[in-house]
Amino acid sequence: MGISNGTHHVIRFSSGEIWYFSFSPNRGIMVQQLDRNSTWKQSYELISNAQEDFSVSIDNQDRLHLICFSKKGELQYLLYNDTGWSKQVLSVYKPTRYTIRYPVVIPIKNRIHILFAIGKAFNTGYWSLQHYYWDETSWHSTEITKVTAGYRLSPFYVDMSDKHIHLVYRGLTTNRYQIFYSRYHLDHGIWSTPENVTYDSIDCNMPSILIRDDLLHLAWTSLSKNDLVVKYKNRTVRSLGKMDWSPEIQLNNPGSTATLPRLIWLEEKIWCIWYQNDTLYCSSSEDRGLKWSTPAELQTRYGTSFQYIHYSTNHPRDKRLFQLQWILGNVEETLSLPLVESYMDLPEYIPNAPATDWHEDIIRPSIDQTDDSPKAESVDNHVDVKETSAIEPPAPTEKNRTVPNVRAALESRTMPGVPGAHQSLENILLNEFERQEEFNYSLITKLDEHSRIGSSVLEDSRQIITLLKENKEMLQALKKDMEQVKQDTRQLKARGLLRRLFHNGY
């Protein structure tokens, strides 16, 4: 059976209610809810004109944030709260000229961060990672970095710590695919210079990231002798420079080709789950990634059928017992997530059970349903869709991020819980030191990269010098041999041997 195509987004509210978002080629973005028998209710269309890539996340106030790209080229942001859905068009990119892939929406407090990759429609392998963000007053945008990724761009992954958004992605460098890392300081609005964190002589792919207990855990796959191996390393979130990464550890056994390693936290352990030989395997660490258990087959409810699932939860029990973003599971009839499902306190799953003791919800209308299209009747209230005014779309290639004056920003900040009160000089200085520290971090990563390039150039120069010396010695030996040949020729000529050979017929 294997892994099915497409991504699947599962949302759980603080009440325990679960919604499932998926994409249908004929109907667009679809929504289903998990009923009392732990089976999915009938699906309804949310956005019929959407393209396949989209992202959904829940914030700490039970609001849903969705980002997608329409067939008309609109980058659409949707917000769901108690009153229904509202929609805003952030930018318009002509689909005939541009392609947008892997949008990600990250709600943090009252701010919203949106990341996506954009490239030319007839792509030659060059992409730009873009960052849109809402600062509670207006939208801004900036380019994070440019990525050389070949014809097929791989997904990028993010996780959050107290002060940063952490980003990992696959990029091409010196004819090899490697894993790169960058982070964004939430208070100061600075992206660090991306750094190569694998430095492998073979291709690397499929990164997975998990932030837990002030550690950044990273797993990925490397291609070695036609075999995909799972590797792992970590670093402290507060560390500076590439030298702070731990040594690499291989998690799977040699000869067992593995794909899609995903990291989760459960029962005070770090777990890595990957797909291998039509089933799932896992390994765990109890000491923050220093040592890992022997890989073992993971028994699942659905055998060899898996979907790639993004799970976003606001449920207190979930947040207390486990932490995950992406996982291989199943959403065909019910929700099945390996390892964590027994901790989710879901209703008992009864396959094909008739729903006789509760009322099925009426199918809700699509967000972009026109007045001429048939409307579903509702016994109570339907989804209230509010169209907000669209912002002026920035050019796809320009950087129009607003850069505030640091002094004015520091002076205008107020102390939490004290409206209008200015921060103390101590807090202002601490914030300024933090900003300078983040700038230094970005500078250090850039210098590390330059140092690596310089070391590589120096090593190449040394090899060239060695070859030149060898060539010089060979030329000197050849010159000496030629001098000896010339000397022997003169001696033969002096003896008249050559003349006798040619004129006497010898």
Image (cartoon, grey):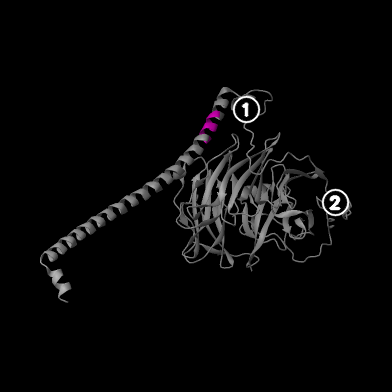
Q: Is residue 93 left or right of residue 126?
A: right
**Vertical side of 232 occupied by 385: above or below:** above
Q: Which residue is disc 1 drawn over?
A: 409
Residue at the spot 62% in from the left edge and 54% down from the top edge: 123
Which stretch appears magenta? 432-438
Residue 175: give its label: none
Q: Which amino acid, by three-letter code, is at mark 2?
A: Thr
Q: Is residue 182 magenta?
A: no
* Residue 240 shows up from this direction: no
Q: Nearer the viewer, residue 483 or 224?
A: 483
Farthest residue, direction left: 495
The quarter of the picture where residue 131 lies is top right
Structural crowding at the residue carrying mark 1, measured as other residues with C-alpha within 10 Å and reported as few (<14), some (14–19) or many (≥20)? few
> Residue 1 location in percent, x, y?
64, 69
Which element type, helix, strand or loop, lies under badge 2?
Answer: loop
| Quadrant of the drawing holding the C terminus | bottom left
> Residue 72 location in percent, x, y?
75, 51
Viewer-side label of 1, 2: 2
Magenta-highlighted stretch: main secondary structure?
helix
Q: Nearer the viewer, residue 323 or 377?
A: 377
Q: Which residue is disc 2 drawn over?
A: 370
Farthest residue, direction bottom: 505
Which element type, helix, strand or loop, lies under badge 1?
Answer: helix
Q: Which amino acid, by three-letter code, is at mark 1?
A: Ala
**How far apart are labels 1 and 2 at the CA level?**
44 Å
* Residue 353 shows up from this direction: yes
> Residue 493 location in percent, x, y?
14, 65
Farthest residue, direction front: 503
Q: Is residue 32 left or right of residue 309?
A: right
**Vertical side of 85 occupied by 342: above or below:** below
Residue at the spot 20% in from the left edge and 57% down from the top edge: 480
